[in-house]
Every structure is written in C-alpha cells, then in structure tokens.
C-alpha cells in the first residue's frame, strides 16, 4: 500500500508536466483576497500536529482548548495531513497562544504559524518551531545575552535571550528562545572556546516533544525514520535526557499535551 504523502507527490508531478490548452491557460481574474477571510484570518493561526497517523479534528480541538485555557473554544478547520486553520474567538487568545509556543498534542510537536492568505493548504511551511533551550555548563564569565545569541544563532534564529536589563544571565542555565529548523537532528549542545579553554555547552529543551531516538528528529515525514533499517551498533545518541527538568517562569503553566 502506498503512503498518502507519496501519492500526493506523484500527482503533483503529473499536474506540473501537463501542457495546458489555451482555454486552461487563460487567467480568470479573481481580484483581491476576500475581506471577510482577511478579518477572520487576522485572529487565526495555522497548526500542524507532527504525527504519522491521521488525527481527528475534534480531538485536537477539544484537547487544545483545555491546554490553551481559552476564554471561548477555538474553531478548527481540517486542511489535511494533520494541519488545521484555527480561528480564535479573540485576537488576545491568538496572541497568547502564539507567544506561548511551543505546544504539544499528546506529547507530539504541534507547530503553529501565522495565517497567511496566500498559502495553499498543502504548502504551509511548518518546517521550524520556537523552543526555549537551556544552555548548561557555560562558564559564569560568558553567561550573557551576547553569548546566548552567538551560540543560539548556530542552532537557528534567536528570538530572545532570558536575561535582565544588564544582559548578565547568571543562573543555573542560560535560557535562549530559538526558532529551530525541524528537518534535522535536534542539537544536543555546542563546543565553545573561552580564553583558550574548550567547553562543551549542553542543551536542554523545555517541553521537548517525543523525538526519534534513532535519528534525533522531532518530526518525521510520512515515510517515517530512514535510520530504522540501519543496524544500530552504538548506544542511542538521543534521549529524554534532552528534556529540561525545570521550566522557566513564563513556561511553568500550561504544560501542554495530554496527560
Ligand atoms: Zn528517526
């Protein structure tokens, strides 16, 4: 049995190779985007649950309403492939959910993107998500915003470094919020050099989703893990030890997912 994803891919190829007739090529001018949709879109997000099996819209809608603690439930519309348009009752709800990323559904990554009227249902880019990463083992002398940004930018786009106004981030760890690309193994740390001393900086993730212990990906496409056919000789290089034990103050509530 063919997987759904590959079927869709083959179909797309066939469509692209078609030679269109004059009638098919002639453009139908649809003008601008629908004003009503534009308004609805401004308090909507697009989300995707990264899981190989198909999940029902109703269960995601019900679960996330509880996780997000919304004033009024958000309405989910199914876009296929476990992705949804999520319309919130208020802009405040939308902003709060967007700012509170990341979110989990049943311990699986639930990526959220802003509504963009030009995206097509199958082509929304869910290839990154924002994580709070705790950097451990940093020498006190470099625990600052600048250092957090330097190390963080080797992982993805740095959104924020959790430091007070003076920029000094002394604490158990340095917390950096990073937009991480998802189609790769999760970063476990970085080697830095401080005044000639080599230091291994460990990463821990707040709200780490279920991850593949074989390849370290947080997501898999419909074909699943390519590493599974490789005979494992070494101990797994990834594990639940990447999960932060303690969450930051702003992430302490709304742990997400299904208990
Ligand atoms: Zn894998």
Image: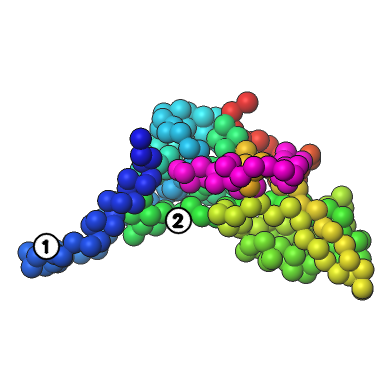
Q: Is residue 40 left or right of residue 230?
A: left
Extreme-left residue of the structure: 23
Q: Residue at x 15, y 65 (%)?
A: 19
- The percent position of residue 228, horizontal first and vertical second, equals 58, 41
Q: Quadrant of residue 191?
A: bottom right
Residue 132 horizontal/vertical position (percent) = 69, 51
Between discs 2 and 1, the one toward the N terminus: 1
The residue to which callout 2 is attached is: 125
Kindly identify which numbered label has been placed on residue 24: 1
Depth order, front residue of 171/205: 205
Query: Between 34 and 140, which is closer to the camera in this rendering?
Result: 140
Q: Specify whether 148 is left or right of 36.
A: right
Please give the range of residues in magenta.
216-241
- Colour setting: rainbow
Q: Name, please, the residue furthest toward the bottom.
A: 195
- Pinpoint residue 216: horizontal percent, then vertical percent: 65, 47
Q: Main secondary structure of the magenta part?
A: loop
Q: Give the total number of marks visible in the rendering.
A: 2
Extreme residue toward the top, this view? 259
Q: Nearer the viewer, residue 50 or 37?
A: 50
Residue 48 in view, yes or no: no
Numbered tag placed on residue 48 in the rendering? none
Q: Please rate how many residues cluster around mark 2, counting C-alpha atoms within 10 Å: few if below 14, some from 14 to 19, many from 20.
A: some
Give the SS element for disc 2: loop
Residue at image position (34%, 60%) is 118
Residue 231's quadrant in the figure? top right
Q: Is residue 223 magenta?
A: yes
**Residue 222's spot in the image, x, y percent?**
45, 43
Q: Relative to residue 24, is residue 41 depicted above or below?
A: above
Q: Quadrant of the C terminus?
A: top right
Q: Secondary structure at mark 1?
A: helix
């Amino acid at each position: 049995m063919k997987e759904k994803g590959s079927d869709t891919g083959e179909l797309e190829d066939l469509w692209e190779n078609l030679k269109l007739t004059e009638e098919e090529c002639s453009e139908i001018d649809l003008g601008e985007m629908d004003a009503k949709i534009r308004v609805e879109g401004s308090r909507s997000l697009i989300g995707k649950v990264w899981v190989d099996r198909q999940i029902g819209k109703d269960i995601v809608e019900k679960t996330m309403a509880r996780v997000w603690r919304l004033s009024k439930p958000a309405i989910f519309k199914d876009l296929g492939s476990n992705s949804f348009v999520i319309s919130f009752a208020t802009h405040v709800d939308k902003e709060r959910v967007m700012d509170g990323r990341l979110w989990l559904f049943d311990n699986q990554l639930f990526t959220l993107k802003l509504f963009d009227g030009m995206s097509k249902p199958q082509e929304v880019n869910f290839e990154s998500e924002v994580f709070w990463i705790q950097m451990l083992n940093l020498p006190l002398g470099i625990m600052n915003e600048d250092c957090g940004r330097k190390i963080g930018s080797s992982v993805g786009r740095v959104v924020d470094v959790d430091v007070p106004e003076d920029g000094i981030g002394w604490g158990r760890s340095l917390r950096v919020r990073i937009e991480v690309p998802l189609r790769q193994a999760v970063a476990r740390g970085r080697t830095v050099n401080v005044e000639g001393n080599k230091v291994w900086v460990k990463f821990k993730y707040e709200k780490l989703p279920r991850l593949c212990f074989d390849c370290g990906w947080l997501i898999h496409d419909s074909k699943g893990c390519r590493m599974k056919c490789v005979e494992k000789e070494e101990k797994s290089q990834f594990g639940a030890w990447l999960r932060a034990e303690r969450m930051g103050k702003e992430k302490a509530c709304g742990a997400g997912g299904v208990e």
